[in-house]
Image (cartoon, rainbow, N blue to C red):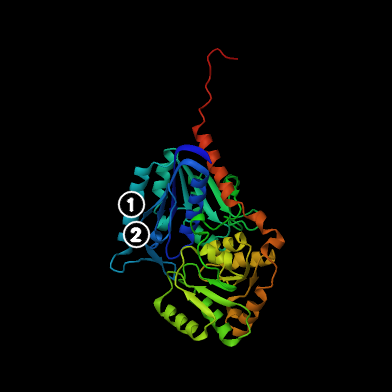
Amino acid sequence: MKRLEHVRILMYSHDTFGLGHLRRCREIAHALVERFKGLHILIISGSPIAGAFDFRARVDFVKIPSVIKLHNGEYTSIDQHIDIQETLDMRASMIRNTVESFHPEIFIVDKEPLGLRGELEEILGNLKMRDCTLVLGMRDVMDSPALLSQEWGKCDMLTKIDQLYDEIWIYGPDNFWNPLTGLNSTPALMSRLSFTGFLDRSIPQSFATGEAVRPSYILVTTGGGGDGANLVRQVLSAYEQDASISRDAIAVLGPFMPAEDREEIFKRANALDRVQVIEFESRIEKMIAGADAIVGMCGYNTFCEILSFDKRALIVPRMRPREEQYVRAVRAVELGLVDMLEPQNAEDPIRMARALKSVVARPLPSSVNAQSMMNGLDTIAGFVEDLIVHRRRPPLAVIEGGI
């Protein structure tokens, strides 16, 4: 373990209604403090369940008020009695106070370049004047090029990224996907792009042992679960239709699945006896590691876990309101990493049952060298070390009378 003396890194995870952003920041933070002594990381998070996760020593979080993104793209407060503008004002004030108190040398912003509704724009400008290194971390796929161009074009986002950010880290390999594909990026902006590889996952030592070994199973995971009920229903319908599926299933619903969906799913699963349902598991890595195959929607974290644990996978991607999961799934199929059913085909119990039977026999991701894509955390650690060493290197002095 190397020492980076008294280094402070601030991370921002806007977190509307899901787990992906916080989990990604947490993985990066844990990897960095594991590699470097003297490093302290603080995560600003809007996740309503940030406290449900374990954080390592020298990693902490500040919880800011939560918001929900509606299907029409607008936001509302998680507390219906508080106006959204009041919530946004509280968030901005807390972020400013955190920045002022923490004095970060590096600020890593996850996915949203200006923060939720632009809440970071002024703060980023102030930090830039204080010589804080500003890093934008982007997942491999943000959205389809057409939708991202439309969204970012409304606020001239590329120009603002170009003006504010010192570095842009793409959390994926350069031969998988470029999230700025199809956008009118300047050469100066593109020169600051660095591809890290996917963020590799492992089973934390704190819970690597101690549980009984489960029998063979297919794991159905929905991430946060807010829009995952249909996937679980499709799997249940397949088991109801076809008793010859060779493996039983375990479905993890996620903390944001609506109560009425949970009740229906538990009732159907109890009648089946072949699908076990778990409401939420904050330590999902061990369940993924023990599964014969994964059924998921191809969010970024799920995809990284599939590759990290070298698991066979059946993907049913979400296609609205963002096309991110579909773009990722199509590219993964092209590379031979996963199987995919489009949502309309997954509605057919016979097709879904056939896919569940075949996924347990498909080639592993390692058969197409997936491990070569999984160096993201080591790469990021190298970037951080380079940034700190560069920042703290004394400037060259001009000696009078020298040659």
- Tell me which numbered mark, 2 or 1, is placed earlier along the sequence: 2
Query: Helix or strand or loop: what does disc 1 sit on?
Result: helix
Q: Which residue is mark 1?
A: 94
Residue type at mark 1?
A: Met
Q: Give how far across and how far down residue 334 sits, in percent.
A: 69, 66
Q: State the residue at coordinates (55%, 12%).
A: 401
Q: Quadrant of the C terminus?
A: top right
Q: State the residue at coordinates (63%, 54%).
A: 173
Q: In this view of the protein, which residue sits in the foreground, 210 or 267?
A: 210
Q: Give how far across and how far down residue 168 sits, in percent.
A: 54, 48
Q: Give how far across and how far down residue 227 sits, in percent.
A: 48, 72
Q: Is residue 92 visible?
A: yes
Residue 65, numbered label: 2
State if disc 1 and disc 2 touch (CB < 8 Å). yes
Q: Give how far across and how far down residue 254 sits, in percent.
A: 46, 70
Q: Is residue 154 visible?
A: no
Q: State the residue at coordinates (66%, 56%).
A: 371
Q: In this view of the protein, which residue sits in the foreground, 240 or 149?
A: 240
Residue 289 against residue 269 in the figure, above or below: above
The quadrant in which residue 119 appears is bottom left
Going by the image, does 76 lie left or right of 184? left
Q: In this view of the protein, which residue sits in the foreground, 140 or 339?
A: 339
Residue 61, numbered label: none
